[in-house]
Image: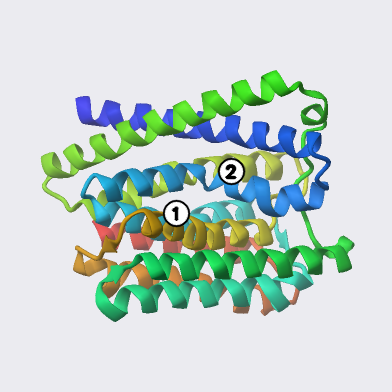
Amino acid sequence: MENIAYVIIGLILLVAGGEFLVRASVGLSFKLNISKMVIGLTVVSFATSAPELLVSVNAALNDSPAIAINNVIGSNIANLGLVLGITAIIGPIAVNNTFYKLTWPVLMAFSLLIYYFLWNDDVLTRLEGIILLICLIVFLVVLIRSARNNKDDVDIEEIDAVAATISYLKIFTWLAIGGVALYFGSEFLVAGAKAFAIEMGVKEGVIAITMIAIGTSVPELAASVIAAMKNEKAISLGNLIGSNIFNIASVLGITAVITDIPVVEVSILSRDIFWMLGFAFILYPLAFIPKKFGIERYEGVLLFLSYVLFIYLVF
């Protein structure tokens, strides 16, 4: 029971820390006069990946590389199977041109790149981490330029207007609270998950790709469901894809720069990463058939049931 309590406390701290970090980042961006579009594409995306980043770095430094890798792979599967599936069930999701021309091809490229890096020598090295980060910077430059050229085509969540008026003191207080909550949240979560895995007699990677991955995807899930239930435009496919790209490039990239991440569980390369590649690949035909520019309710059901099947097979 104590281990479960650690995991739950860790998840609560990560969600709270991520929320404080997003609000502080947005407030700071307004103070520095950065456009809403750029805030949405860069600052918010990076801030919402902070829980995954802290968990992966903490796990890698604490000799739990399976948690470091499967946290990201599992989060990416949960974002597309669980979050996108539930959101599409509540209401159909619109797809824009940027998805077909830029974000989906880049997501597939990053997914295949991380597969190659891990398959090649069973370790994600510092050099490979640097390559991932350079590729991310190039992608962001291209994305921001294309967004400026197609202002109507990029769907970015409306930024809280209150964020524009908050003081520097409040911003730095939020940053401090967010940072502390993320640090201790990752400590509790990794320690609790490791102990829970030993107690239950399952591998750390199984806990990471299910419990931890769903936990670090909670902010995206909450935002999507609330938006869909309010009949507002739900979190777009582009935003979820952006989150997945950040997970691979920034979370694994930064973690690998800090310390090499070895593949210690066979299932990562024999099963889990293929599910991640499959969920990424299937998005294109789903967004194209039966009609372009949309993911329908029944396709959401298909994604959700596929995610349930994945969880069943993992256990």
What count of labels does the image hold?
2
| Residue 311 coordinates in the image, percent (x, y) | 33, 57
**Residue 295 visible in the displayed image:** yes
Q: Residue at x 26, y 55 (%)?
A: 65
Which one is in front, 192 or 228? 192
- Is 315 rendered above or below residue 185? below
**Residue 114: which disc?**
none
Badge 2 local density, few (<14 within 10 Å), some, or many (20+)? many
Rendered-image quadrant of the N terminus: top left
- Is 19 rendered above or below residue 313? above
267 left or right of 258? Answer: left
Disc 2, SS: helix
Disc 1, SS: helix
Which one is in front, 263 or 154? 263
Q: Residue at x 51, y 72 (%)?
A: 110
**Residue 75: which disc?**
1
| Residue 286 coordinates in the image, percent (x, y) | 61, 74
**Kind of residue sitting beneath label 2:** Ala
| Residue 41 coordinates in the image, percent (x, y) | 70, 54
301 left or right of 228? Answer: left
**Kind of residue sitting beneath label 1:** Ser
Give the labeled residue for mark 2: 47
Q: Which quadrant of the view contains residue 275?
A: bottom left
Q: Which quadrant of the view contains residue 189?
A: top left
Name the front one of labels 1 and 2.
2
**Residue 304 visible in the displayed image:** no
Counting residues from the N terminus, which is met first, the one under dot 1 or under dot 2?
2
Q: Residue at x 79, y 33 (%)?
A: 31
- Is 273 rendered above or below residue 166? below
What's the colour scheme?
rainbow
- Cα distance between the residues tagged 1 and 2: 15 Å
